Image: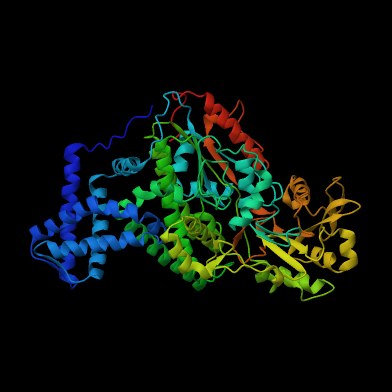
Amino acid sequence: MAPMLNLGAGPLRTALLYLVQLVVTVAVISLLARVVPGIVIADFQSGAAAVIVIGLLNGLVRPLIIRVTLVLNLLTLGLPGLLLNGLLVFVVGAIVPGFQIADFWIALLLSFVLALCTAAATAIVLHGPSREAHNYAAIRRFARRPGALQPDAPPGLILIEIDGLAEPILRRAIDAGYLPTLKRWLDEGTHRLIPWETSLPAQTSSMQAGILHGAHFAIPAFRFYDKKLGRLLVSNRARDARLILKPNETGQGLLKERGFSMNNWAHGDADEVVLNFTTVGDKTRGVIPQAGNLYGYFAQASSLQLALLSMLIEVGVELWEGWRQRITNVQPRVHRGFPYPLVRAATTVLLPRLSEYLLIQKMFEGISAAYTTLVSYDEVAHHAGIERPDSLRILRQIDGQIRHIAEAAAFADRRYEIVVLSDHGQSQGATFRQRYGYRLADLVDSLIADPQQTTQTTDTADEGLANLNLALTELMMEQSWRSRLLHRVLGGQMHGGEVRLGEREMHPSELGNVVVCPSGNLAHIYFTDTPERLTFEALLTRHPRLIEGLRTHPGIAFVLVLSQQHGPIAIGRNGAHYLATGEVDGDDPLLPFGPNAARYLAELASYPNCGDLVVNSLYDPATGEVAAFEELVGSHGGLGGTQNQPFLLYPVWLDDAEPVRDLHGAPAVYQLIKRWQARLQTASLQLGERSS
């Protein structure tokens, strides 16, 4: 059994903490009174009395109001809590002699200062491990403990995904000092870092289905056209996500035994799920059932102020970094204007903090398994580049989150093993449009017999913005005056029961006879006027210039098409690979993509919603560059470069007789983790040392 929390504070240190908070806060607001009109403090005693009364109100009144307005706090990123802080300060200004506040807005400003002072004083008195233990104790107080944990309970498993981070990039970042926690684990020999190889498509909905459910059948891309339904299916739309995952749900997900899924695409059969595209509409899962667990975060007076301040700083950092790329003419680069800076702030500050808070709370409740996705690196790397300072700085932040989770695990009643992994990497390069001046859809349109009928699907929102839309959609599930108010405010931004800020759904009538669906440097091309997949022979008859024009284009490495006579064929500039037999005619177009490329393409070709044609962009093995069919510097979805090289970092003692080698495809990762879970079930709490 893990030791109970020991803050190393005791009565004297606790008293010292309150004393330092009092002195620091009074000193700061006395200084503010000299420079900010509208704040009057007669003397130190008046300031001290005001701070004490504010503290008492925060301790007595604020928790009650926060509990009543909790969901509204979630909806508005904590606006009621912030206004409440200002109101409490304003009220104190009216009742404490010698302390006066001119108006509410000055009180709101002062409430920010008070929160920052509280955080600073805590850092002064409780530094290093003591301060973190203090924070974990605060989280533990709000954990809802469903029942006593059995003394012989096996270790639990915490799976932390760093979305979009490739193994080679991770190794170089560790060597450069960006991830000191992971480096320490590797240096001490407690963990092992290995690569694994994605199949196709190399993107989150497919790979997470494979990791958490053991299969990703019928998920050909992030977005694709369903000929039977006659419409697009997009992974980050809730109604589509449920349909996309359904063929792979067997009830044997990694999280089926008292598991917790946070901020993922697939749910892994977890009982408790928060922010998941595939469970929206399930009233037993989502943000609303977890609202009580988030109470502790919003009840702490300084949490929101520090989060909002950090978000404002992150917006400023993004504006600076984007300007620096433009002024120094960094290439390749893409537009990084609004709303992206706001989306980046939410995905690198707010969502990670809520994820970390909830995950630690669930460990204190004794869950058996958890999986959470940290999306911040993927979001920034898409826009800034996969190994540029902008993205590497985010890795330092992620390392801090992992350290906090590992430290908190040491105080849980259950022992936990921590595995860090990614579901895919990213590959960099100038986009197809930047290289050639036109989109893939424009190229297709120029090659088909009836031009001006090709649509390229670019109607979906940024991935980070999609996560925010998901949070708002889950909150809309609550049947109350708050959700009805949100319906009124966001009614114009709702489609099919989902919030769609920043995107417009294309109606089927807007789609042409040819639809191009890009996912990074992979694209599916569909002819919507036929209910079945067109074969190589049929395409030659209908559009004799199309395949020839695509395979010989310098921006395209190969075209995948289904032949009635030969089965699936990958056709390149100077040769073809017959996937059913393995025969190659001329130069093998798949040679640069590794020995497993043919197997992955054959599997992709077997999916019922695979495109009539599938196109993979150029790939330069010397530089690792690809040419995304979307306007992203870092991309993933197809074959080529580090997008196909994710990683696993795991406790060494979980190895079998031999270290893990040659993991090909997400289902292989699923099988490996299932073996680990079986080992954990038979392990005693005393086996091995703590991974943290």
Q: Nearer the viewer, residue 341 or 358?
A: 358
- Tell me if residue 652 comes above or below residue 241 in the rendering: above
Residue 541 visible in the shown view: yes
Q: In which quarter of the image is the N terminus?
A: top left
Quadrant of the rendered structure where residue 192 is? Answer: top right
Q: Tell me how the rendering is colored.
A: rainbow
Residue 513 at what x, y percent from top left? 78, 69
Q: Which of 683 and 108 is in front in this view?
A: 108
Query: Which residue corresponds to the image point at 71% horizontal and 71% vertical from the top-left?
Result: 509
- Tell me if residue 38 comes above or below residue 24 in the rendering: below
Q: Nearer the viewer, residue 174 or 252?
A: 252
Q: Quadrant of the C terminus?
A: top left
Residue 409 at what x, y percent from top left? 41, 37
Residue 645 visible in the shown view: no
Image-based side of 487 in relation to 148, left or right: right
Tell how many labels. 0
Residue 19 at what x, y percent from top left? 15, 48
User: What residue occupies the far bottom of the structure in this picture?
Assistant: 452
Query: Which residue corresponds to the image point at 71% horizontal and 46% vertical from the top-left?
Result: 217
Residue 20 at what x, y percent from top left? 17, 50
